[in-house]
Image: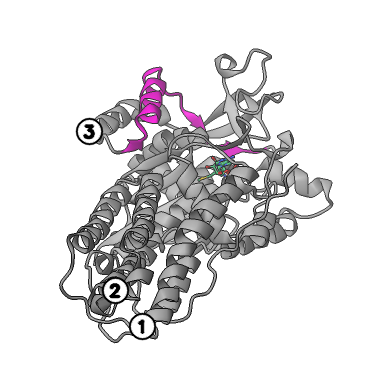
Amino acid sequence: MKTFYITTPIYYPSAKLHIGHAYCTTIADAIARYKRLDGYEVFFLTGSDEHGQKIQRTAQAQGKTPLEYVDPIVADFQELWRKFHISNDDFIRTSEPRHEKVVQEIFRRIQDNGDIYKGEYTGLYCTPCESYWTELQLDENGCCPDCHRPVEKVSEEAYFFRLSKYADKLLKHIDEHPEFIVPTSRRNEMINFIKQGLEDLCISRTSFDWGIPVPDDPRHVIYVWFDAVINYITPLIHKPDMQRFWPADIHLVGKEIVRFHTIIWPAMLMAANLSLPKQIYGHGWLVTDGDKMSKSKGNVVDPVLLVEEFGADAIRYFLLREITLGLDGNFSRDALIQRINADLANDLGNLLHRTLNMLGKFQKRILLAADDLTDLDKSFRAEALDTAAQYRRLMDNVQLSDAVKAVWKFVGRANKYIDETMPWKLAKDETQRQALANVLYNLTEALRIVAILISPFMPVTAQKIFNQLNVTAEFKLSDAETFGLLEANHEVGKPEQLFPRIEVEKS
Ligand code: ME8
């Protein structure tokens, strides 16, 4: 069986998740669901990144142990993913013993291969970002170039990973595998970064203890990023699943952490004699008025409230349609409501409602065999199949937004087909019975195909459409690539509203 492995980053349980995190997980979920639809056996992993000084400090400030502090936050993550219908196959917590074991094993392996050594580290450390920086990298105020908060000078005995040794090997790999880092802008950025030379990486700390102990030297805990990236193999290693799913097909990550995933992680894998992931996809940020959403800026959108108000499918639709993967995209409530009203309530909702309504009125909800098609009927059928083919091409190329748009173009076409064929007129003319049956059959088939194609984006809506069409089959991509699977005499259900229109108060 074809296999496919996709991951999201594991999120810090340091702040409430916002819609930006849900964006990343929704993309990964849509890809995972698409691959399952196409017959792949999929492994889809997400989780939480729980170690580090920042978590320890926050917990202490609240009079809690780190675990007491993170447990309810991680439970909230899991609840949020459930509400978003995220279909992850496993959820990794870096505080779990299964992960600790693997991290220590990889540490030992790299150490045995001679690429971890003990030395003295003096550096400028940004605690909120868990990152060390060099003088040169600091911003104009001498602060962290990412979050612009002050850095601390830290000096300690530490273990180092011989990252410098892997610069040329990494460049060669990137050169030989153009698909390794996507999009190209990120690829070029990483090539330039490596060409400036890589320094060995400090991978242990003694200044706090909330982390995974270095094997045989437990005064040190392993640097949180070294620990975190290993999550991608924790559930697989030493199991037959390792052969089946590793190397990962896609690590989907935000653009600011591409460096950790395309330089440090691959170098660690090389040092541990493991193969490299096939692709790292750096997606853009969800912004509000051009600014990245973050708690400190106070511009976060709470995904839980949003799901309660609009439902997961509408938000998933908006995120997948509005934002081109790889670029930043704007989130706005007004734009979301506009999409719900225009695309979901109007275009898709009406197509389903009109079709089932006419079937009820004119044919007692029974499909009749199509025969003697007009050119218009034939071209409509051809467009359905063209849409499915185009969708497959786009989805295979991870062009999710274009794939959504292709399906909606066809939904628009189907609504126009109703206006062109005017079934209500055909119904008044006894000699047009067959023509009417053809139009209603084609529309029902079109809806069956649309439901399959949207199932990775809007799983609940797709199922609702199948239920109303009274189709009990499993969702399969190949079924969307065949026109005419519904049999004559099939009885459809009654129309029910898919999406209510949202009334907007005029100010
Ligand atoms: O970086 N729009 O965790 P994290 C889009 N623990 N994506 C956003 C976003 C926004 N406004 N805000 C955050 C970490 N993200 C590490 C990862 S992986 C081994 C360790 C994305 O919780 C961000 O780009 O800070 C990143 O990919 C992800 O959320 C996790 O962020």
To which residue does mark 3 refer?
A: 176
To which residue does mark 1 refer?
A: 363
Percent x, y of residue 408: 39, 53
In the image, what residue type sits under mark 2? Leu
- Horizontal arrangement in the rendering, residue 255 relative to residue 180 (left or right): right
Percent x, y of residue 389: 23, 55
* Colour convention of the picture: one colour
Segment colored magenta: 180-206
First-in-chain label (2 vs 3):
3
Q: Residues within 10 Å of mark 2 (few under 14, many from 20)?
A: many
First-in-chain label (1 vs 2):
1
Q: What residue is shown at x 27% (from left), y 82% (from top)?
A: 368
In the image, what residue type sits under mark 1? Gln
To which residue does mark 2 refer?
A: 436
Question: Please, is residue 275 above or below residue 117 in the view?
Answer: below
Question: Please, is residue 213 above or below residue 68 in the view?
Answer: above
Could you say which is closer to the camera, residue 366 or residue 161?
366
Pointer 1 and pointer 2: residues touching (CB < 8 Å)?
A: yes
Percent x, y of residue 504: 68, 50
In the image, what residue type sits under mark 3? Glu
First-in-chain label (1 vs 3):
3
